Image (tube, rainbow, N blue to C red):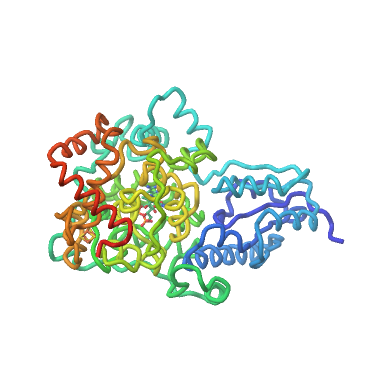
């Protein structure tokens, strides 16, 4: 029988950071690290093959680094079932005095582990990766009638002295979006700096084979795979972004172009969410690039706002509102997710492009997620839980604390406006303005009825009709709703008839 250990330190697949609080006071002579791959983490939602490779490969590389550093480690290779059952067995084997765990990124996992430890004391420790603790976020929301990311972001800037000159924001303003968010011209983006891709080593190749055999029917493909899976690779990817793409990040942040998945984005979300990178070092690198005159303030500020603002804010909302948040459905949406979300097989060019690259790389940038795949699901009226299941499955950076508020709140307005101040709705004309997709599409973004009507445009008007009463006096949507007054009753009926065809998949 093995000698009982003092602490069993549980490290989850998105906690690959040696500085995490669960390692505080770790004593290799008395303590043991436990890591475990389970099928349930890849099947509770139908995880894409890229996402599974990302998590398992990064976990195995982290385990190798722990072993090399001499830490005693019990690493369970892919086993059937869930984390809870596996932990019950580990506790029976190691008989720890305490189980220690950094706060997980998923409410479901935390509950399962709490049950699994039984009578063994469990320490759930603050996740210091984030700049804003749950307690700090609770203090931010206390007494506020409405919450807005912008005010939270300003507090974070002041509190952490980021992009500040004394008490004032650098450049005299908190937000420079007026200088950002252009579309590419008719000739497209021109030369694009290549993204950082990393050749799979032996560990990753083994994982790719495992995923191909064990998760054959899962969406997308396991290879080619080029995401960072170690801290060294993540740091290298960050540096390349700062040196080659940050300069133009702000300007082209919202632009899209057919067949160009990477553009000027950072592609760092997975490395951040698996904790291979610390948000402070990413923010500091962007701020230094501006202070050294290498990038414009609008780009540095726009980028920092995503990490210091949105990323911290959605995490705060998640832990504040779970578990009820996941069941919210303010717009009473009950359609099923169209089956082609899992294949990209649709004549709608913008969706085919965004879903195609998603399945191939496990990646799409924010506007593709919000204003293409998310917008279509919102206008179509898909049940928010199904939309959430899709986003959690397909992206390499998908962890529930960040995915759920973005999907349910920002993209589907299912929380009734807690996260977003209005539903992000638009017709096909928005996509036409921000991309070249409509040029190659059989539909016309300017048409709302008839055979060539763009389904986004039809469903946009149908959304306004369906929710006319709810949003008639909404401060940010009333103007859009007012446009309904211009429609003759026959036009309204034609829109609704066409919307029914789109929902039945008969748009042509
Ligand atoms: P960039 O555009 O280069 O942005 C830089 C960094 O800022 C990102 O790496 C990310 O860490 C952070 N960031 C940017 N926007 C957000 C945001 N809205 N919320 C939180 N962090 C942000 N992000 C995830 O990390 N995981 C998800 O599962 C996820 N699901 C999403 C689902 C929907 C419906 C929407 C609309 C957005 C989602 N996002 C998610 C936010 C955002 O789209 C991604 O973080 C971003 O596209 C990742 O690509 P990037 O690293 O190139 O980011
Ligand atoms: Fe998408 Fe409509 Fe444009 Fe086609 S016409 S690419 S469906 S927005």
Percent position (x, y) of residue 50? 47, 67
Percent position (x, y) of residue 217? 51, 71
Vertical position of residue 458 compared to residue 133: above or below: below
**Horizontal side of residue 479 vs 393, given as left or right:** left
**Horizontal side of residue 220 vs 28, given as left or right:** left
Q: Is residue 309 visible?
A: no
Percent position (x, y) of residue 363? 38, 62
Percent position (x, y) of residue 351? 30, 62
From the viewer's side, name the closer residue of 351 and 282.
351
**Horizontal side of residue 374 vs 120, given as left or right:** left
**Horizontal side of residue 506 vs 221, given as left or right:** left
Quadrant the N terminus occupies: bottom right
Instruction: Tell me the residue at 52%/36% (across/down).
Output: 134
Count up the numbered dots. Answer: 0
Instruction: Tell me the residue at 26%/63% (across/down).
Output: 348
Instruction: Tell me the residue at 15%/45% (across/down).
Output: 490
Residue furthest out toward the right: 1
Image quarter for residue 42?
bottom right
Instruction: Tell me the residue at 34%/48% (across/down).
Output: 378
From the viewer's side, name the closer residue of 164 and 237.
237
From the viewer's side, name the closer residue of 94 and 88.
88
């Amino acid at each position: 029988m093995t000698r009982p250990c003092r602490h069993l330190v549980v490290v989850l697949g998105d906690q690959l950071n040696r500085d995490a609080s669960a390692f505080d006071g770790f004593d290799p002579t008395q303590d043991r690290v436990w890591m475990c791959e389970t099928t349930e983490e890849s099947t509770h939602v139908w995880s894409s093959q890229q996402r599974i490779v990302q998590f398992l490969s990064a976990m195995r590389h982290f385990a190798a680094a722990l072993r090399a550093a001499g830490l005693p480690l019990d690493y369970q290779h892919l086993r059937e079932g869930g984390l809870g059952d596996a932990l019950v067995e580990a506790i029976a084997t190691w008989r720890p005095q305490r189980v220690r765990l950094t706060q997980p990124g998923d409410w479901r996992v935390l509950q399962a582990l709490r049950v699994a430890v039984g009578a063994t004391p469990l320490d759930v420790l603050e996740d210091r990766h984030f700049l804003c603790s749950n307690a700090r976020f609770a203090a931010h929301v206390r007494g506020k009638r409405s919450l807005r990311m912008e005010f939270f972001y300003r507090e974070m800037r002041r509190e952490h002295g980021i992009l500040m000159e004394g008490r004032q924001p650098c450049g005299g303003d908190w937000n420079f979006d007026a200088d950002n968010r252009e579309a590419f011209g008719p000739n497209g983006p021109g030369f694009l700096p290549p993204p950082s891709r990393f050749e799979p080593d032996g560990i990753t190749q083994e994982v790719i084979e495992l995923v191909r055999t064990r998760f054959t029917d899962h969406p997308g493909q396991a290879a080619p795979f080029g995401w960072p899976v170690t801290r060294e690779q993540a740091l290298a990817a960050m540096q390349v972004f700062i040196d080659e793409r940050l300069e133009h990040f702000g300007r082209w942040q919202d632009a899209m172009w057919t067949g160009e998945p990477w553009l000027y984005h950072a592609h760092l979300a997975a490395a951040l969410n698996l904790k291979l990178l610390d948000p402070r070092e990413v923010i500091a690198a962007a701020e230094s690039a501006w202070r050294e005159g290498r990038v414009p303030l609008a780009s540095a500020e726009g980028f920092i706002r995503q990490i210091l603002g949105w990323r911290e804010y959605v995490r705060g909302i998640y832990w504040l509102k779970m578990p009820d948040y996941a069941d919210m459905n303010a717009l009473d949406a009950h359609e099923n997710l169209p089956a082609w979300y899992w294949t990209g097989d649709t004549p709608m060019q913008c969706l085919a492009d965004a879903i195609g690259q998603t399945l191939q790389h496990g990646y799409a940038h924010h506007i593709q997620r919000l204003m293409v795949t998310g917008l279509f699901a919102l206008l179509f009226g898909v049940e928010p839980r199904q939309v959430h299941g899709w986003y959690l499955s397909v992206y390499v950076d998908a962890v529930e604390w960040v995915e759920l508020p973005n999907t349910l709140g920002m993209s589907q307005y299912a929380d009734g406006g807690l996260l977003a101040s209005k539903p992000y709705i638009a017709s096909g004309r928005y996509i036409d303005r921000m991309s070249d997709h409509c040029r190659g599409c059989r539909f016309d973004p300017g048409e709302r009825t008839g055979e060539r009507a763009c389904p986004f445009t039809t469903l946009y008007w149908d959304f306004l009709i369906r929710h006319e009463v709810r949003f008639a006096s909404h401060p940010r949507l009333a103007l859009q709703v007012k446009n309904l007054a211009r429609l003759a009753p026959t036009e309204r009926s034609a829109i609704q008839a066409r919307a029914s065809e789109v929902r039945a998949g008969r748009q042509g």
